[in-house]
Amino acid sequence: MAVFFTFAPRHRSNRPMKPILVIGIAFCAIAAGSTVAGTAGPAAAGDEATIVHVLNRAGYGARPGDVDRVRTIGLRRYIDDQLHPDRVPDPAMAARLADLTTLRMSSSDIARDIERPQVEARRARKQQGANEPPPQPPPPDPVQQKANSVVVELSEQKILRAVYSERQLQEVLTDFWFNHFNVDARKGRDRFLLTEYEREAIRPHVLGRFRDLLGATAKSPAMLFYLDNWMSADPNGPHLEMRPPRVARGPFGGRVLVPATPRPQPQGKNAPKGLNENYARELMELHTLGVDGGYTQHDVTEVARAFTGWTIENPQRGAGFRFEPRRHDAGQKIVLGRAIKAGGGESDGELVLDILATHPSTARFIATKLARRFVSDTPPPELVERAARRFRDTDGDLREVTRTILISPEFLAAAARGAKVKTPFEFVASALRASGAEVEDARPLVRELQQLGMPLYMCQPPTGYADAADAWVNTGALVNRMNFALRLSSNRLPRVTVSDIGAHANTMLVEPISESTRTTIAKATDPAQIAALTLGSPEFQRR
Amino acid sequence: MTMTSRRIFLKQGAFAFVTLGFAPSFLARTASAAGGDGRRRQLIAIFQRGAVDGLSMVVPFGEADYYRARPSIAIARPGGDEAAALDLDGFFGLNPRLRPLEPLWRARQLAIVHACGSPDSTRSHFDAQDYMETATPGVKNTADGWLNRYLQARREQQATPFRAVSLTTQLPRMLQGRAPALAVSQLAQFGIRGQAGDAAGASFEAEYAAAADALLAGTGRDAFSAMKMLKAADPSRYQPANGADYPRSPFGQALRQIAQLAKSDVGLEVAFADIGGWDTHVRQGAAQGQLATRLDDFARAIAALAADLGDRMDDTVVLTMSEFGRAVTENGSGGTDHGHGNAMFVIGGGVRGGRVYGRWPGLAVERRHDGRDLAVTTDFRDVFSEIVARHLGVADPRAVFPGYDVQPAKYPGLFAAA
């Protein structure tokens, strides 16, 4: 099987693209509609259009040669392999990510090696600034640049994996679930926490149990900080945490009983002042039940009480989760009609997560969002119901829920083809794949995505980026996409190289292709222009 | 400008495009929209990102506590030298580096709302900007910004691609949402670029013009109409009117481009620009220094915009805002830390200017928010909702401000009631 994932050597040369006759021929073939089953109705599994559809949805689109490879191993087998990424060899990925050293660092390493030097440099600058006016303009600051590099490298990684990983579905789902449990890198220290968050809280669980994913995000410093739970405290606290009485050696060698003593209290302006409901609300509205999932403001407050004391151990050192009993509200809570007994401590939050993860509204909400990602902006209700039932029957096994959608007739139906408008990230990744681009440096692409209105890891609201066409179709964004298509096709993106770009154009577009696109492309002669008009066409904006 | 002269201008503008060989498809729509029953009102929203020190912009020189709390950075009482505040009403004074705005105050076109802000007491820039842009303080998952909800509330059948424009690289939260809005940092760069740009543009246009995909075809047609219009207007050769002298700063250039769009009669209704550099924790300065330099840029750019727009200011409101104010007492580094209440400027020909609005809470420690910050006595949504109702003409602005009890009785009174 591995043979099907072995690829021809990549084009590493930087030679300019030559006009090749075969490109024109490929496009004429599209124009004549002879290579793609356009109106053949629901296609038999294994035909080209169906394979392109699956590659567009379960991944970031077809690369040159992908359709043939999938046809050889069979579509069903391909989907099954993608649902088990550990079975899919991905030998080249590690080398592509090797230079991005922060990807493998823990949050505490990042805090020690990158964040603290930056904080100290800033402090030194302030003290220096107290004596002399700041220089205008400030010179580039290497420590600051290194601090920014953490999110930049994470973004480079995301692009490189989407373009080159053989485990395409895992990349799609990592993007999907990060966005579901969105954290914005621009909120304070979160830019130093997202590397570990994606690597350890999101990625390992995207085909695992929902409850594990939910629990990992709930205890992640990134989420605790982003939605403020780290500072949420019982307003009637802080509570004394007694050190139990113990026996110690007395001053004269004898043994004495040391009585129970309260531990010191957190003080100062940063001491938590009261209940913060942000996480409790988003947990129910966005992470589990959905806005119409049947909870009240009273439930929000009760859930917030349950999570008091869930905080971050020594935030400045990048340490992990800690339960702080002095901030915890130890009283009884009633969540969605179920009692959580007084005195549960840290387990209060775990019980809330159990209640939410097994609630039927959660099954339905997650099924709806997955079906929207894979099928259409308004997914068929029968499919959503089947996926939700699978969620309930398997105790939230995300592999099985995802499989239910990917093998459904609704997913393979002709109506689903091209029904989704690509997000800017999907557009960029699919354009790079379709054109067989060689990315030596992904940083220019990180900047392109900012221009295209989708800065990676920087979606401000906890809702994440929208997964519906109307959020991404507007005049400015469309012009930017056309310009990106032109720059990519004519090798004007720095350190991103395309060669033989038009040769595999028959997998670039999803049928039906409109007459205006056919004739416009047929009129072009220059291969770079042909490719640009293909990647910038209305059809390529869809998947 | 009277209605008659506006129509003449519009006709001349349309004629100019026709003679150049460009007839943007929406120009006719614009003409009919402006020639209908009402005048086209415009709102230009300006965000001072980073929390400007409102007590240095609009100085309560009548308060002894102000001078006690700020021994090294207070703005001197009026009547002294050039470093002194400009007396507004015997109690408040304008920072001397805001002098370019003083004529607007004297002409009663500039109103100030002081001690204005959010009911949420967060001191996070991130969260507070989010709350101000969504106008839902304390609620983080609001899907859209309040300016976008305004665009949704007043559906504009004749909307052009330039109905809502942000002179920024990315669309600000305030304009995000279902209604179309355009983010473009440089008008001159809005188009298909590169050596073969024109040819490629024509081909893309052909692809989108007749695409079966209605959603993308419509957006594509608007995009190319907009490009042609901008090309005809030739941003690089724009000459401001009435001697308006914009600073060369990014903010000055953003406002210059807003004026250019407004004067091109392309259907601009809402414009947005932002200006940073206000987070003055260290060495803030007084009439000179870091903050003064930013205020100078800010004031000169807005004054140039008002001059450039001329009679159009009758139908325009310029609104400035910042996520929160700064602490009353200066800190140990000659700066100010994050605070609460702040000052907003509301400028326009229809504004009842020359007045500082809002109840002044005082700066005595026991009158402060948390014992340290200027208290908020006017919810910023009262300012926003009055502008939406009485300037932009939305009879019932409640849909624009979900979860808020919008009440005309709470409006500061910046405009005459209809």
Image (cartoon, helix red, strand yellow):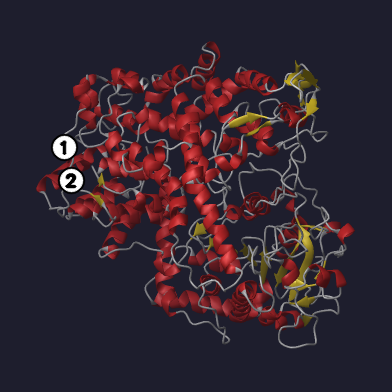
Verify CB contact (< 8 Å) between mark 2 and mark 1: yes
Which quarter of the picture shows residue A434? Answer: top left
The x, y position of residue A297, in whole percent, is 76, 32
At numbered mark 1, what does the secondary structure look like: helix, strand or loop?
Answer: loop
Relative placement, left or right, of A67 versus B239 is: left
The x, y position of residue A399, in whole percent, is 44, 19
Q: Nearer the viewer, residue A239 or B232?
A: A239
At numbered mark 2, what does the secondary structure look like: helix, strand or loop?
Answer: loop
Residue drawn 80% across the image and 65% down it:
B418
Query: Disc 1 residue type?
Result: Pro
Q: Chain under label 1?
A: A
Q: Which of A18 and A136 is in front in this view?
A: A136
Residue drawn 29% across the image and 17% down it:
A77
- Count of numbered labels shown in the rendering: 2
Query: Badge 1 is on which residue?
Result: A9
Query: Badge 2 is on which residue?
Result: A12
**Which residue occupies the extreme top position in the image?**
A393
Relative placement, left or right, of B16 versus A293 is: left
Residue drawn 12% across the image and 53% down it:
A18
- Give the spatial CA distance, label 2 vs label 1: 8 Å
Which quarter of the picture shows residue A27? Answer: top left
Q: In the figure, B190 relative to A449: above or below?
A: below
